[in-house]
Amino acid sequence: MAKGIKVTGDEEVRRGLRRMSKAFPAAAAKALWTEGIALDAEMVQRIPVDTGRLRSTHYAAPPERDARGLHVEVGVGTAYALPVHERTEVAHVTGEAKYLANALAVRAHGFLARLGARMRRTGWRV
């Protein structure tokens, strides 16, 4: 360091970094879950309806942290959900095949910006 230069405020910076690092996981989890709920809402509008059972089992599970990182699971809870999702040759009166993939494609645009904005609204700042 050059002679005569004094650095001040380093302790405030350290405190701020510690505060941010503690607040980050909760802010990220809350923002990600909100995005998961929005994805679920988009998906449920696209789920084909015959008896209504498939649509009635939709969910967005609370965020979990594991070896893969932080994630939110969105899906439907029937054994036949995957075939209904994948069979693009079936013409549905209500809904569509690829209901989750299509909803995800719509919600993917702007995802990071929305996630950051949601985190900032919780009080977390970079």
Image (cartoon, helix red, strand yellow):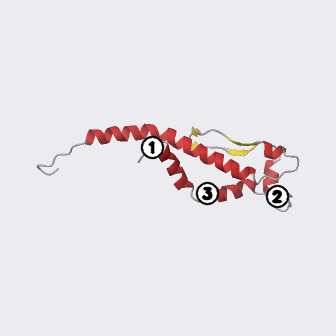
N-term mark: 3 or 1: 3
Q: Secondary structure at mark 3?
A: helix
Mark 2: amino acid: Arg
- Numbered badge on residue 87: 2
**Image coordinates for residue 53, horizontal then vertical, percent:** 84, 43
**Image coordinates for residue 87, horizontal then vertical, percent:** 82, 58
Q: Residue at x 61, y 48 (%)?
A: 35
Q: Mark 1 — residue?
A: 124
**Image coordinates for residue 102, horizontal then vertical, percent:** 71, 58
Q: Which residue is farthest front?
A: 121
* Mark 1: few/some/many CA within 10 Å (<14, 14-19, 20+): many
Q: Nearer the observer, disc 3 or disc 1?
A: 1
| Viewer-proximal residue among 41 and 90 | 41
Q: Is residue 99 left or right of residue 61?
A: right
Work out how far the residue at label 3 is from the one at label 1, CA to CA, in angstroms: 23 Å
Instruction: Kindly indicate whether the residue at mark 3 contacts the one at mark 2 (C-beta within 8 angstroms).
Output: no
Q: Secondary structure at mark 1?
A: loop
**Count of marks overlaid on the render:** 3
Q: Residue at x 72, y 52 (%)?
A: 43
The image quadrant that residue 88 belongs to is bottom right
Mark 1: amino acid: Trp
N-term mark: 2 or 1: 2
Instruction: Kindly indicate whether the residue at mark 1 contacts the one at mark 3 (C-beta within 8 angstroms).
Output: no
**Image coordinates for residue 90, horizontal then vertical, percent:** 86, 60
